[in-house]
Image (tube, grey):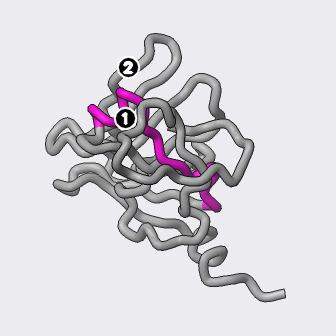
Amino acid sequence: MNATPDIVAAAQGRTGGCLCGKIRFTVKGEAVYPHTCSCKHCKKLGGGPMMWWAGFAPENVTWTNGVEPTWYTTFEGEAQRGFCPDCGSRLAAIDSDVPELGIVVTALDDTSGADLVPVNQSFRDDAVAWLDQVPDTTEKSPVG
């Protein structure tokens, strides 16, 4: 059986980083639970109607420039969001009840992988009314 190009690329790693380039990272492996989130925090942090997240095993995320994000606690004892202290780009999330590290998909250099297509939308009740919601195609817990 031959591996698809998406599977091969995920195994080799994807690169990403912030807008100014101070923080760069590599993620390996297939994305877990790619989804959008419309919670009030994501809307304010992202500056839009939602953010696009995917999870990766923490051991498969490497901060390659020797600089890690600055972490901001969004929910005390439950969640932190990582961003670049220079340009403000949102990059990652740590949630106490989720084993994966959430990565903001738009921080990746290439967002075209089939495993990055959102399978759900979190906080639907907080979503803007003028934008169609992402269909729920899975029963997994959210990352981000």
Give the side of residue 11 with respect to residue 82, left or right. right
- Residue 18, given in percent of the width and then of the height, sits at 26, 52
Q: Residue furthest top?
A: 76
Which of the labelled discs sits on residue 73, or is there none?
2
Residue 1 vertical placement versus 78 (above, below): below
Residue 42 vertical placement versus 78 (above, below): below
Find the distance from the CA under tag 2 to the CA under tag 1.
13 Å
Q: Residue at x 60, y 57 (%)?
A: 31
Q: Residue at x 54, y 49 (%)?
A: 35
Q: Residues within 10 Å of mark 2 (few under 14, many from 20)?
A: few
Q: Residues within 10 Å of mark 1 (few under 14, many from 20)?
A: many
Give the side of residue 130 with respect to residue 22, left or right. right
Query: What secondary structure is found at the residue carrying circle 1?
Result: helix
Give amino acid for label 1.
Cys
- In this view, the residue in front, 137 or 11, is 137
Q: Residue at x 32, y 36 (%)?
A: 43
Q: Residue at x 24, y 41 (%)?
A: 47
Which residue in the protein does label 1 denote?
42
Give amino acid for label 2.
Thr
Residue 72 vertical placement versus 105 (above, below): above
- Residue 44, given in percent of the width and then of the height, sits at 27, 32
- In this view, the residue in front, 69 or 4, is 4
- Residue 58, given in percent of the width and then of the height, sits at 58, 42
Give the side of residue 69 with respect to residue 143, left or right. left
Q: Which residues are magenta?
A: 29-45
- Is 42 magenta? The answer is yes
Query: What secondary structure is found at the residue carrying circle 2?
Result: strand
Viewport quadrant of the N terminus: bottom right
